[in-house]
Amino acid sequence: MKKAKYVFVTGGVTSSLGKGIIAASLAKLLQARGYSSTIQKFDPYINVDPGTMNPYEHGECYVTNDGAETDLDLGHYERFLNIPTSQANNVTTGRIYQTVIDNEREGKYLGKTVQVIPHITDEIKRRMLLLGESGEYDVIITELGGTVGDIESLPYVEAVRQLRWELGTDDTCVIHLTLVPYLKAAGELKTKPTQHSVKGLQELGVQPDILVCRTEHKLTPEIRKKVALFCNVNRNAVIESIDVESIYEVPLVMLKEKLDKVTLAKLRLSAKNEPDLDKWKDFLFKLSHPKAEVNIGLVGKYVELQDAYKSISEAFNHAGSVNECNVNVVSIQSESLSEENIEDRIGQLDGVLVAPGFGDRGIEGKIDTIKYLRENNIPFFGICLGMQCAVIEYGRNVLGLKNAHSVEMNPKTKFPVIDLMEGQKKIKNKGGTMRLGAYACDIEKGSLASKVYGKNAIQERHRHRYEFNNDYLDQYKKSGMVMSGINPDNNLVEIIELPNHPFFIGVQFHPELKSTVDNPHPLFVKFVRAALDKSKEA
């Protein structure tokens, strides 16, 4: 059985430096050299998972095949490595404390006083080592959320300190991501924030092996030498991470900086095989050298925050590269839309994606948008609530079901075309109780969906409580709407489409969660193609 090595990625100076991207880039380079690698994220917040958190608070909630609601960084891991993550890849302080308290209630600590050290740190260490026990991976990369110095991060740093002592320095490596800011008034880069950040880590008993320095300007040899000297790392372990246009350039930047080689040397692993990144470079070339451009509207209620629809944005990048076109995503707040202004706001777009979400804020704007798209033959793609809005719009304006709605928005609606799933009706706790994870879907032969996927049996990831109400199934079918995707186990409608339209499709699941650089999602690829065809008509 393989003995795994462990890399820990910490952050300093400020948040949002990109620990997840650096971790994913390193894993990609190790994978390209023939090493099996995975990444896990440890988040210091006390929520058990981000499932009940507002997207404005946390960004999107990423869902894995096994139904875990996780941090959006897991999306980066999957998009870079093209391998699925799981429940074990994301751990929060809430989950750690919940486990320890449950153990205490069961008497597993034999009456001892339960403390942060050793009980909380022992549980953190157990989970840090969990993926390595499978024998499946050569290297486990663990990203620690938060910033060194945060009170809530202290038990995680202490757990890393203990693991380094227990496993030995040859089997562990600490990478510290920090900021080297440029002071315009002084006209120079400043290393003091990095020095203080490393000092803070050292005071907690952890000496970083490698420093990755985020910077807007190139690091001079003098600055690298200074950072290495005062932070007590080798000169070749000061890695420059300069700002780039796309996150997908970062692995190539890290390759040039030899982050993978330095890490492998620290772990006493050979830098076997030059990394094969030809497919990655081809993707990047097409992404940065588009032959055309399309303007696609993203209609949602959280558009002010870029990370709220992160996986959708990245799926558009993947699909744009395949179609060799630049996808210009135009974010539109659904609350701002009405029948009076829709033509001015979206009439010139080449396609519109109506985004997922919860609650009734902005719902009428989404419904009015879909009506305009349907009547004016503009490509439409609806995801989760976007699909449900298409059902509501069709019921109101084609079937004549006046004020048809979802019971989520209007529990007393006369025509509940979207209803609460039967298994959800007795559930009171909100956390982790939705229909979550991968479910099967059978696709009708000859449908648009079957042409998009090129097959008739698929698996897609879900995150919802409400569904198409099958009491109205025959009524919708007779009027021309095609229910082209059905879950074989419970007969739930998964895909709806309109055949006499350039591209009109809604899905109950979240296809954006499975789109990767190596395997762009076919629904996004075909939607962008339809938008491209629309743009050529003008």
Image: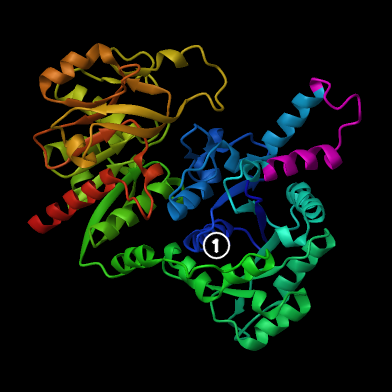
Please give the range of residues in magenta. 105-129
> Does the magenta segment cover residue 53?
no
191 to 25, vertically: above or below: below
Task: Identify the residue at image location x=57%, y=50%.
Answer: 39
Task: Identify the residue at image location x=35%, y=18%.
Answer: 489
The residue labelled by disc 1 is 26
Say which amino acid is labelled 1. Answer: Leu
Locate residue 500 relative to residue 433 in the image: left or right. left
> Does the magenta segment cover residue 117?
yes
Quarter of the view holding residue 373: top left
253 to 334, vertically: above or below: below
Residue 277: x and y in percent read: 41, 66
Which is more toward the observer, 298 or 461? Answer: 461
Residue 102: x and y in percent read: 75, 24
Residue 72: x and y in percent read: 51, 47
Placement of the C terminus among the 4 image quadrants: bottom left
144 to 449, vertically: above or below: below
Secondary element at tag 1 = helix
Which is more toward the observer, 225 or 171? Answer: 171
Q: Is most of the magenta stretch helix, strand or loop?
A: helix
Quarter of the view holding residue 175: bottom right
Crowding at dot 1, Cα within 10 Å, few <14 / some 14-19 / many 20+, comes out as: many
Residue 124: x and y in percent read: 73, 42
- Single out the residue that lies furthest toward the front: 1
